[in-house]
Amino acid sequence: AQSVTQLDSQVPVFEEAPVELRCNYSSSVSVYLFWYVQYPNQGLQLLLKYLSGSTLVKGINGFEAEFNKSQTSFHLRKPSVHISDTAEYFCAVSDRGSQGNLIFGKGTKLSVKP
Amino acid sequence: NAGVTQTPKFQVLKTGQSMTLQCAQDMNHNSMYWYRQDPGMGLRLIYYSASEGTTDKGEVPNGYNVSRLNKREFSLRLESAAPSQTSVYFCASSEGRMGRGLNTGELFFGEGSRLTVL
């Protein structure tokens, strides 16, 4: 069964510094990949997604992620973070041709400090 | 545009009590989902409904039942609540199933229902 590993449960970073949130998934079969963000006391919203095509995908709020099939990774990056980026970030994967439900990682809490 | 609406937002139950979480979406989506979120566990799928009239178990269905009342509404019922069901519950919807038809791959989430079972 597919699984998702987010390697860091918490990432503290100073404002305007770059950040990378790491995500690996277990299966090498064709997949769809997503990053969702959850602000405090809110539901999740989509940051970006990889369905096919270019392996570098850009999302909202200046985030981007790169799909690396050989390393089964989908790391999220932002070159300069803002205080408002403080949130929990979830990586999710869905196998193509399967039931298609999203499998979520356990989340990474990003704390941006002034 | 309300999107996905969940009620209630907060609920406290005693062990053994029953309750129903309601969810409605106004985006004409075919698929709906119930997830639970626990600290350090991410989101785990309880039940889903790929289309009106169908429901299927997800990863953690025990202790729950669901009803897809119509295309808009998908309810989650706890028949006899247990402390292990203390969690934040999220309803979500999508246009369709992954890889099928017109599907952008995006889930739209409600704001969550925080349930405490004493």
Image (cartoon, coloured by chain):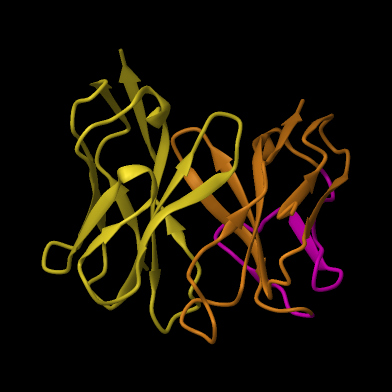
Chain colours: A yellow, B orange
Give the answer, above or below, for where B12 lies relative to A57.
above
Q: Position of residue A99 (x, y in %)?
A: 50, 78
Residue B101 among those drawn in magenta: no
Q: At 59% from the left edge and 64% from the top edge, which residue is drawn?
A: B58
Magenta range is B53-80
Give the answer, above or below, for where A2 lies relative to B43.
below
Residue B102 found in image quarter:
bottom right
Q: At 44% from the left edge and 80% from the top edge, which residue is drawn?
A: A98
Residue B65 among those drawn in magenta: yes
Give the answer, above or below, for where B85 lies relative to A49.
above
Q: At 80% from the left edge and 67% from the top edge, which residue is drawn?
A: B72
Residue A65 found in image quarter:
bottom left
Q: Nearer the viewer, residue B3 or A72?
A: B3
Q: Nearer the viewer, residue B104 or A95?
A: B104
Q: At 85% from the left edge and 72% from the top edge, which residue is drawn?
A: B70
Q: Would residue A39 appear left or right of B28 to someone viewing this image?
A: left
Q: Is residue A106 visible?
A: no
Quarter that holds the C terminus of chain A = top left
Q: Position of residue B36 (x, y in %)?
A: 61, 46
Q: Position of residue B9 (x, y in %)?
A: 77, 36
Q: Nearer the viewer, residue B37 or A1?
A: B37
Q: Is residue A95 visible?
A: yes
Q: Would residue A109 appear left or right of B102 to someone viewing this image?
A: left
